[in-house]
């Protein structure tokens, strides 16, 4: 059995359910889905999609750093959108946090996300 290390930081929102912000096993970190909660207020502070996406990537960055890495170490992202017409906007925000070579990625539309947010992102990081 692989040793697991639980990753937690107050620079990203606390878990709102029975899960960890991230779990590291070996040199791989599995980052739980990040939604646009402000980590200080634990509230969604905007309905603007681009601002929500930016908060999500800030939260994701904070978790990667708590795990000893950075967004450049992410090898896979899954992006969940409640409206796929925001695909181009999420790309615009994402390039502020990632450089080439970009991680592998999936982006899918789903009917609903926690707290009625418009975007959630989870990832896998290798350090």
Image: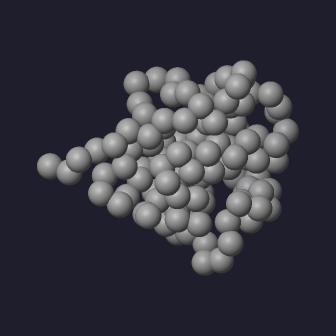
Q: Position of residue 21 (x, y in %)?
A: 48, 37
79 up-or-down from 45: above or below: below
Q: Measured from the top left, where is residue 68 in percent x and y?
A: 49, 54
Q: Residue at x 82, y 33 (%)?
A: 47
Q: Residue at x 61, y 72 (%)?
A: 102
User: Residue 90 is drawn in which quadrant?
Assistant: bottom right
Above-or-below relation of 52 to 109? above
Q: Relative to 120, does residue 104 appear above or below in the rendering?
A: below
| Lateral position of residue 127 relative to residue 115, left or right | left
* Side (left or right) of 45 relative to 97: right
Q: Is residue 12 visible?
A: yes
Residue 13: name its quadrant: top right
The answer to whether residue 88 shows anywhere in this view is no
Work out whether 17 lies above or below 6: above
| Color encoding of the figure | one colour
- Which quadrant would the C terminus be assigned to in this image? bottom left
């Amino acid at each position: 059995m692989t040793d697991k290390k639980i990753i937690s930081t107050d620079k990203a929102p606390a878990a709102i359910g029975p899960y960890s912000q991230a779990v590291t096993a070996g040199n791989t970190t599995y980052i739980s889905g990040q939604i646009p909660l402000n980590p200080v207020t634990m509230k969604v502070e905007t309905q603007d999609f681009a601002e929500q996406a930016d908060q999500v990537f800030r939260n994701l960055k904070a978790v990667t750093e708590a795990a000893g890495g950075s967004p450049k170490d992410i090898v896979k992202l899954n992006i969940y959108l409640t409206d796929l017409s925001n695909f181009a906007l999420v790309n615009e925000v994402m390039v502020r946090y990632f450089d080439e070579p970009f991680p592998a990625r999936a982006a899918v539309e789903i009917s609903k996300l926690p707290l009625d947010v418009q975007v959630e992102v989870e990832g896998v990081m290798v350090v």
